[in-house]
């Protein structure tokens, strides 16, 4: 999958993935969704964002989880 709205610049925000070169990390947007914020609330908080930015941030997060093994606590 090609991400056209996610950028990584080592000289910006410590190289974390951001939205369209803005200083808005993908993790911030994904965290806002996880916290239960609605799309209109997120767009109000970050007026430079667009609907497609939120959608692609979620797709990017899903893809990164598919590509990595994360340590999980085993419950028995």
Image: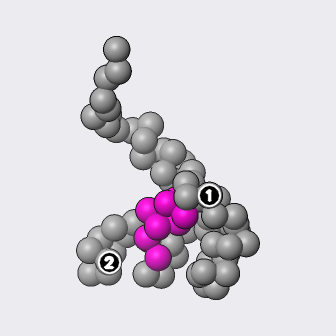
Identify the image quadrant of residue 68: top left
Decide whether the magenta segment is chiefly helix, strand or loop. Answer: helix
Left-right relation of 53 to 76: right
Q: How many marks?
A: 2
Identify the residue at horizontal 54%, vertical 48% (top origin).
Answer: 1
Q: Is 8 situated above or below 1?
A: below
Identify the image quadrant of residue 39: bottom right
Identify the residue at horizontal 59%, vertical 81% (top origin).
Answer: 46
Q: Position of residue 35 (x, y in %)?
A: 55, 58
Identify the residue at horizontal 60%, vertical 80% (top origin).
Answer: 45
Identify the residue at horizontal 42%, vertical 41% (top origin).
Answer: 65
**Label 2 neighbour load within 10 Å: few <14, some 14-19, many 20+:** some
Q: Position of residue 32 (x, y in %)?
A: 55, 64
Pick out the residue farthest to the right. 40
**C-alpha separation, residue under disc 2 versus residue under disc 1:** 25 Å
Left-right relation of 52 to 27: right
The secondary structure type at the circle numbered 1 is loop
Magenta segment boundaries in residue numbering: 24-32
**Label 1 neighbour load within 10 Å: few <14, some 14-19, many 20+:** few
Q: Earlier in the sequence, mark 2 or mark 1?
A: 2
Give whichever of 16, 2 is nearer the camera: 16
The answer to whether marks 2 and 1 mark residues whose Cβ atoms lie closer than 8 Å is no
Pick out the residue farthest to the bottom. 47
Q: Position of residue 10 (x, y in %)?
A: 27, 74
Q: Position of residue 5 (x, y in %)?
A: 55, 68
Q: Which mark is residue 13?
A: 2
> Which residue was labeled with disc 1?
36
């Amino acid at each position: 999958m090609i991400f056209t709205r996610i950028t990584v610049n080592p000289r910006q925000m410590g190289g974390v993935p951001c939205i369209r070169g803005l200083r808005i990390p993908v993790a911030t947007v994904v965290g806002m969704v996880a916290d239960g914020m609605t799309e209109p609330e997120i767009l109000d908080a970050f007026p430079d964002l667009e609907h497609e930015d939120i959608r692609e941030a979620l797709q990017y997060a899903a893809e990164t989880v598919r590509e990595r093994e994360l340590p999980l606590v085993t419950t028995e």
